Image (cartoon, helix red, strand yellow):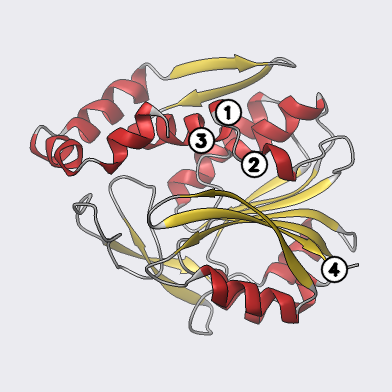
Amino acid sequence: MTFLQQLDRLPLYHHAVRWFRLRQLAATFLHHFPRQYILPGGVRYRCRGLEAILLSDEIFNRQVYLKAIDANKVRTFADLGCNVGYFAVLMASLSGRRDFQGLEIDANPEMVEEARWHLVANGLHKIIPLPGLVGAEKAGENADFYILPSNAGSSQYPIYEPGKPPKGRWKKISAPNLNLESAWLQNVGDVRCHILKVDIEGSEKMLFQNEQKFLQRVDAIILEWHKWIVPRETIDSVLAEQGFRLAEILEELYQTGIAWYVRKE
């Protein structure tokens, strides 16, 4: 466990962040003076908040997704719960290519705009950023979504992660309720999805149950699960019915984990 992970587990750290308004101060400072980095292959990314720094540590330093990615074989992907769009940056850095096709989707419109910045900055013009909710619990044109001040942890389920102090009050917004199969056909085409990356804060079960048609075109899944909402064993069972098997647990922490699934032969 890295220092940043250990820090994120400390209640005192989260209390200090709230007491001294560190998140707001950091957001204000980084908005005007973002930390920018260049990865191998000339790929650029920036951090404009505390959570972006933690996320960049997970993706670029600890490289938790690396074992599940053969970048030379991947041509298409969908990133659900894309946050600031680091997964596309990672794919471009690993492969040295900019010709990927796919979708980046997040229910928080501010995160979609930050993801759009990373796509434009790196010439990833065939990856389409979309605002919206996938895996909504209720049908309809729009769905309720709850945003935290931290950005990370925003969900359609306003339930705080056990063991951590609340990161602020939930802010309810109305998000477009997206059908993933329709969005893929409209923006990418009738082609395979080589990797489906999912980090949607507890909505994964509903997604996999409601998007069976889209799952038929998916080859592999990288999933972050959230134990206080849906246990991984439930997800294993749902995905097994859709033709996937658990390949490996890439990382497991106290309340979350990252799992890699592949299509059964």
The three-letter code of the residue at mark 3 reads: Glu
Quadrant location of the C terminus? bottom right
Q: Label 1 sits on what residue type?
A: Phe
Disc nearer the start of the sequence (3/4): 3
Reading the image, the residue beneath label 4 is 264
In the picture, the disc for residue 159 is none
Instruction: Report x, y in % for residue 131.
Output: 55, 56
Asked whether, in this view, residue 102 is left or right of residue 1, the answer is: right
Asked if residue 123 can be seen in this view, the reply is no
Q: Is residue 230 above or below residue 261?
A: below
- Circle 1 sits in a helix, a strand or a loop, which is it? helix
Residue sitting at x 28%, y 47%: 149
Callouts 2 and 4 close, C-beta under 8 Å: no
- Neighbourhood count class around disc 1 (C-alpha, 10 Å): few under 14, some 14–19, many 20 upward: some
Q: Report x, y in % for residue 230.
A: 46, 72
Residue bearing the label numbered 2: 65
Residue contact between numbered discs 3 and 1, judged by CB atoms under 8 Å: yes
Q: Comparing marks 3 and 4, which lies closer to the viewer?
A: 4
How many numbered marks, from 0 up? 4
Which circle's residue, 2 or 3, is located before the other in the chain? 3
Q: Is 233 on the left or on the right of 16, as rendered?
A: right
Q: CA distance from mark 2 to mark 3?
A: 9 Å
Report the side of 60 relative to 264 (left or right): left
Q: Are marks 3 and 4 in contact (CB under 8 Å)?
A: no
Q: Amino acid at mark 4?
A: Lys
Secondary element type, mark 3 = helix
The answer to whether residue 86 is seen in the rendering is: yes
